Image: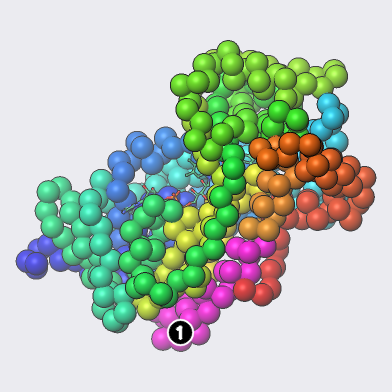
């Protein structure tokens, strides 16, 4: 490799999703250099519609990092959520149950836009449309990332690699066989999600249990509604013309004195539901974060928040190591993160199991258990608090 095609940095970050971009910004603020390599182009990354619920801790961190100005202006702060079943709504008041805490609705792609703008403004390197990224030497103290950019083969030498490249990335598979233990649960259903140009039909999110399957009412702004329907995991979106989607949503959300507003659908897609964790979240000079190492079903709204929580721990560990040579936090990175990861896995699994119709539930046994659980959550302060404190985000999690 010629000298002009070889560069050096302290942290080589793979992936410009929330994990990679938050990590890059945290490191930049503490004087640690990094280069972010992203496979897709900027428009694609900024346009990808995904999560929308930010925990208080995520919002606080983004504000502290100096990327919260638009978030604080445009984000919708929610102090509760509605659980709807048997055609009736029941409100869980987060603020009352969690000392005034809540969530903020702000699209993941808006967070990503704000972080990309901050990175480019800081003049820190972020390369889009990078091909064939390959982590090398992770067992040595001189790891590197080989990649192709603008038709040129290049090498980025670094002290450590941060694998923030999502579930289908190249970093997790770069760990030698036998090192990671992966645990997985695949659910026998998926979500069909739409974005519609219509004002939300409720001020808060509605998680709806119905005999025909789960439905969720969410939003992105006072003019944009986000809605989801439980569907087959491999559902063909072509089978769902707009009229059929609205018809099904109207049936599932039906509730006296309430109606679902309809508008032009501007985006639709199907997401499978999966729980996955690979442990440990590090090997040698490779640290993994976010979807690259764990996936949660979207019912708990935890995916984006977990990715941010991981890189917050990682940034602190790296800053300490680079500034003092002390490796203690770096070595315990995985253990520190896994407590929160498994707590979020449990919450997401519990919410998913409580709300979705199980395809094998022929005599309705599961559905009756779900209704009993939902009745309990809505009538017991202790059970409602369990939902509320997990939903707004656990402050401290021990274990791992
Ligand atoms: P990602 O956002 O996946 O970012 C990884 C980045 O790495 C991407 O930009 C990708 O292009 C890049 N990359 C991948 N491979 C390479 C490579 N080889 N080289 C360089 N770059 C690479 N969560 C919710 O809470 N609610 C939701 O409704 C919801 N919907 C979702 C819908 C979909 C289709 C998906 C996939 C996820 C959804 N999630 C949702 C989960 C949430 O969006 C993720 O948890 C979050 O994006 C994790 O951030 P991340 O930075 O770890 O990974
Ligand atoms: C969303 O607004 O996209 C959203 C909200 C809550 C969830 C999942 C997705 O649990």
**Residue 200 visible, this angle:** yes
Looking at the image, the residue that sits furthest to the front is 363
Q: Nearer the viewer, residue 266 or 298?
A: 298
In the depicted structure, whether residue 84 falls above or below residue 113:
above
Horizontal relation, residue 252 to residue 332: left or right: right
In the depicted structure, whether residue 25 falls above or below residue 193:
below
In the depicted structure, whether residue 81 falls above or below residue 155:
above
State the image coordinates of residue 129 (x, y, percent, origin top left). 25, 46
Horizontal relation, residue 141 to residue 301: left or right: left
**Which quadrant of the figure contains the C terminus?**
bottom right
In the depicted structure, whether residue 37 falls above or below residue 7:
above
Q: Nearer the viewer, residue 170 or 66?
A: 170
What kind of secondary structure does the magenta stretch mostly adopt?
helix
Q: Residue at x 81, y 42 (%)?
A: 365
> Label 1: which residue?
327
State the image coordinates of residue 247 (x, y, percent, origin top left). 65, 16
Horizontal relation, residue 103 to residue 11: left or right: right
Stretch of the chain drawn in magenta: 316-343
Q: Which quadrant of the figure has residue 41?
A: top left
**Which quadrant of the figure contains the N terminus?**
bottom left
Mark 1 surroundings: few (<14), some (14-19) or many (≥20) residues within 10 A: some
State the image coordinates of residue 210 (x, y, percent, origin top left). 75, 31
Q: Residue at x 24, y 50 (%)?
A: 130
Q: Residue at x 59, y 16 (%)?
A: 244
Q: Residue at x 38, y 41 (%)?
A: 45
Horizontal relation, residue 157 to residue 71: left or right: left
Q: Is residue 7 magenta?
A: no
Q: Which quadrant of the figure has residue 142?
A: bottom left
Q: Is residue 341 magenta?
A: yes
């Amino acid at each position: 490799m010629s000298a002009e095609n070889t560069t050096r940095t302290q942290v080589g970050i793979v992936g410009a999703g929330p994990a990679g971009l938050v990590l890059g910004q945290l490191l930049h603020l503490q004087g640690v250099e990094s280069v972010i390599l992203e496979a897709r182009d900027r428009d694609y990354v900024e346009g990808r519609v995904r999560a929308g619920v930010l925990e208080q801790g995520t919002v606080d961190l983004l504000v502290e990092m100096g990327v919260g100005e638009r978030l604080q202006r445009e984000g919708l702060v929610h102090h509760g959520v509605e659980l709807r079943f048997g055609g009736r709504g029941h409100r869980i008041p987060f603020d009352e149950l969690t000392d005034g805490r809540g969530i903020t609705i702000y699209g993941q792609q808006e967070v990503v836009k704000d972080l990309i703008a901050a990175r480019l403004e800081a003049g820190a390197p972020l390369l889009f449309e990078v091909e064939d990224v390959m982590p090398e030497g992770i067992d040595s103290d001189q790891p590197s990332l080989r990649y192709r950019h603008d038709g040129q083969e290049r090498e980025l030498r670094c002290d450590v690699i941060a694998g923030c490249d999502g579930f289908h990335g190249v970093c997790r598979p770069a760990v030698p066989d036998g090192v990671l233990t992966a645990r997985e649960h695949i659910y026998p259903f998926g979500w069909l999600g739409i974005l519609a140009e219509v004002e939300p039909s409720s001020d808060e999110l509605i998680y709806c249990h119905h005999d025909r399957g789960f439905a969720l009412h969410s939003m992105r702004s006072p003019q944009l509604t986000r809605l989801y329907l439980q569907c087959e995991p491999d559902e063909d979106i072509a089978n769902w013309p707009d009229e059929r989607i609205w018809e099904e949503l109207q049936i599932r959300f039906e509730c006296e004195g309430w109606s679902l507003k309809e508008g032009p659908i501007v985006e639709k897609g199907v997401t499978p539901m999966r729980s996955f964790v690979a442990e440990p979240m590090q090997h040698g000079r490779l640290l993994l974060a976010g979807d690259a190492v764990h996936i949660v079903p979207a019912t708990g709204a935890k995916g984006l928040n977990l990715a941010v929580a991981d890189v917050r721990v990682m940034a602190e560990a790296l800053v300490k190591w680079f500034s003092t040579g002390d490796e203690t936090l770096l070595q315990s990175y995985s253990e520190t993160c896994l407590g929160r990861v498994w707590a979020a896995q449990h919450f997401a699994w519990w919410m998913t199991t409580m709300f979705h119709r199980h395809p094998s539930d022929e005599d309705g046994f599961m559905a009756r258990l779900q209704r009993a659980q939902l009745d309990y959550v809505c009538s017991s302060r202790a059970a409602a608090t369990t939902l509320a404190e997990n939903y707004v985000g656990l402050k401290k999690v021990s274990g791992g």
